[in-house]
Structures are given as structure tokens and as C-alpha cells.
Amino acid sequence: MKKTVTIVTIIFLLGLCFNAPVVAQDTSPKDPYSGDLLSRSTLTGDWGGFRNEWAAKGVTIDMNITQIGQGVVNGGKSGAWQYGGRGDLVINLDSQKLGLWPGGFFNLELEGNWALSVNQNTGALMPVNTSQTLPLPPGDIFGVPAWNFAQFLSPYFGLTLGKFATVTNTSGDMNEFAHGKGATQFMNMALNFNPLLAFTVPYSTLGAGMVVLPTKDPKEAIISLLVVSTNGKATTSGFEDLNGNAITVAGEGRVRTDFFGLTGHQLFGTTFSNKKFTSIDQRLDQDVIENGVVRAEKGSWNIYYNFDQYLYEPKKGVDRGVGIFGRLGVSDGNPNFMKFFGSFGVGGKGMFESRPHDQFGWGFYYINIDNPRLSIDIPRLPGLSRNVEFLRNEYGFEWYYNFAITPWAMLTPDLQVIRGAQKNKFTVTQGPLGVLPRIDRKSISTSTVLGLRLQLLF
């Protein structure tokens, strides 16, 4: 443990002391927060010029609130409608623009959610409301998912250290048409990033790593390598979770392509954790019941890929048009019971000249489950067979259209149809003292979920 801390400290000090000049392309607008109420990028505007002034000096403060109402209108486990929301505050500092030293970047994020979601009502592994799972489910949770520092030692290479909001931030498993925290594009978690990663990489965790920019421009190509704690939460500091036997190594590379003369991206990545996980194969006997001993598996890995490709692009490099996307991933299958994952779909951004901020998407995902099995070697429990399989393969569809009422107010109707991994809903009926409880099961049918999302940028 002391050796690991020493190495990380040395890397951090090198990043602070090596002040090699870093050349970065500044393509941000001169006054990003200016304009009248209906045309500016945020509801609160430029704060009397203060906000634009600080943005020019490398300090940006961005806030948003996402509110979602959803209901399971058919199938699933429950037809209840729920309302919830999430607030997000992000502060970024650029040391060079602040007049301090070149190549330093600091990121801080605070977020919280409130009320409820229908995630537990669908019978699916994948939350139909990603936003309401962050920083942690259920509602009324506040956390600090990110506070990290990056120091570029040259235009091609940088080091980073701190706490990271991993796969849902602006870089992890990035995709033009299907990425994020469920606030602007798809709402289903399976269409925002590859869910295989969630088994080995926590949403918020401490770590250190490096970033390589082969062409100096992160939009053209970027390679990252992170070593993070496999245990981590946005609601804790994370230092108490540092453990050499619970470490994840994550590597990823993304490159821009120009197939057919149109913008696209290809991404490859992998993660490996040395943590000891619970095996998906368990034999339930009297010893397990009395002593709580379960079978474990050491280590877990996955390999993943995604792409996006514009098929229509009114002007190259303006991040507008219509295209396709896809994701693939494979894991060890035990302890990670999600053996294979695939998704694909169609997305669009600013498709119409008169509606430059609108977005839309249609997506499909499929998860191949290496089914957890429970072998029972005690007297038969009423309602359960001797060998129980709890899950099945899961797949789902989602359609959304993001109407930009103004650049800072976006209203999104959403429809999802999910055949969840949970096959049955179990109900336990207590019997008289000394008699085993009765366990009844009811099959869970395909669920249809309607939703309406409103995001406000402040």
C-alpha cells in the first residue's frame, strides 16, 4: 500500500513540476454565455459579464437539472408512475488561461438526485432511467463523483490523478450518438455506455493514469490508461477503499475516421480487475445457510468496442447530422454474468437548419446472460426447484426525440420496450413457527415504459 502511494505521489509531483509548453486549440466562442433569453446557451446567462470573463480566464461553472416522469404502462413488475430528478454542478479550471502554468486542468463535479424512478418496476437489469442512478440510487442522494487534476507534460502526453466519474463522463466509452448520464440522449443505461464495464469500474472512484494525444488534438485521437480502485462511491472520499487486492486497470483508445468523406470514430478498450468477486455458481446447502460461506472467483475482465459514423453531415466538423452507432463487448462470464453485450442504432443532432439543437435516437440492445445458478442441497423449499436459474437474456428498444424549446431548455418524450432479465417475481408467504416459508413465483412479461424528460441548463 505504501509503495503504491509513493509511486502515485511521484507521478503527481512530476506533473506539477514539468512545465513544458502545451499547445491547445481554443475553439470555444468568445462570449459563450451571452445573448438574449431565448438564444443564449444557459438560463442565467453571463451573470453581468462575470461568467464570460472567467471563462476567458479558464474557469467555467456549469449547472443543470434533469427532471423525469416515467411509468410502466404495460407488463413488467408494476405499473406505477414515478417522478424524480438529478442536479449537476461542474467546475473546470485551466491553469494556463489563469496565468499560472501551462498544461494543468482541474475538474470538480457535484451531483444529487431526489424522489423515485421506475427502474425497479420493469424486471430489467438495465435501468430505464440512467439519470436517477447517479450518483447512487435511490433518490435523495448527494455526492462528489469527480475531483481530479491532469498535467500535460507536452502536447502529446499528460498525467492525471484524483477521483473520476468514469464511464459516464465526457471520455469513457465515448460515442457521438449514444453516451452520457441519460440527460440529453438515450435514457436507458445500456444505450449510454457498455454495461460490462460497470462490473469492474465503479462510477466514481480514486485512480491515476496517463493520456496520450498522438496528433496533439484529442478530437482526432486519444489513448488513456487508468489504474483505479475497484471499490468506490461518489458519497465517500474513497481513501478508505484503497486496496491492492481490489484494483482495476482500464485502457482505451479512440480515433476519428473519415469514411465516405464523413466524420466517424472507432473505439477499443479493455478492463481487468484483481478483486475477489462472488461466483455466479453457488451450491446452497446446510453449511452455506449456517455459516454464510459462498464461492468466490478471483479477477474479472472485459473487452469492448464502439463506433459512430455520420451518414449525413451538412458541414464537416460542426457536430451536426444523422448517423449510426454500435457497441460490442465480451466478458469472462463468471463472475461477470453479462457474458456478451451488443447495441446499435440511429442518431441525429441538429438535423434541420431551423432546429440546430434538436436530437433524436433509436436504439436496440442485447445482453447475453451466463445465468447465475443455485443448486439446493437441503430439503426442498416449497415453490422452488432443486436447480434454480434466476435470469434470462435481456433485450430492449428505445426511441426519443429531444425538442430544444430554447438552447437551455430541452423536452424529451421517450418510449422503451424491454424484455427484462428477470423471469419471475417471487413472493414470500410466512408460515407458522418452525415451518419453512412458502415461495410463490409469477412470470414477468415484456414491459413498455413511457417517459417525459425536461433538462434545464443554468
Image (cartoon, rainbow, N blue to C red):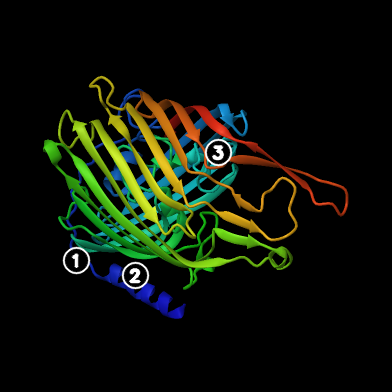
Which residue appears farthest toward the right when viewing the image?
Answer: 433
Residue corresponding to mark 1: 20
For marks 1 and 3, the one nearer the N-term is: 1
At horizontal 52% and vertical 42% (from top left) the residue drawn is 421
Q: Which residue: 34% across, 70% down?
A: 12
Question: Where is mark 3, residue-wise?
Answer: 119
Q: CA distance from mark 3 to mark 2?
A: 40 Å
- The location of residue 160, given as percent across then percent down, is 33, 63
Front residue of this view, candidates 85 and 349: 349
Residue 436 on image: x %, y %: 80, 52
- Label 2 near label 3: C-beta < 8 Å? no
Image quarter for residue 7?
bottom left
Density class for disc 3 (Cα within 10 Å; few <14, some 14-19, many ≥20) is many
The reply to whether residue 185 is visible in this rendering is no
Instruction: Tell which tag, 1 or 2, sits nearer the viewer.
Output: 2
| Mark 2 burial class by Cα count in 10 Å: few <14, some 14-19, many 20+ | some
Dot 1 alpha-carbon crowd within 10 angstroms: few under 14, some 14 to 19, many 20 or more = some
Query: Element under label 3?
Result: helix
What residue sits 35% from the left and 30% below the top?
A: 361
Element on which disc 2 rests: helix
Q: Is 9 drawn above or below residue 57 in the view shown?
A: below
Quadrant location of the C terminus in the rendered image:
top left
Evaluate if marks 1 and 3 touch, with contact meaning CB atoms under 8 Å apart: no
Query: What is the CA distance from the residue labelled 1 to the residue labelled 3?
Result: 48 Å
First in sequence: mark 1 or mark 2? 2
In this view, which residue lies farthest toward the bottom?
3
Pinpoint residue 83: horizontal percent, then vertical percent.
57, 31
Quadrant for residue 259, please give it.
top left
Furthest residue in direction left, as rendered: 261
- Type of amino acid under label 1: Ala
Q: Which residue is mark 2?
A: 12
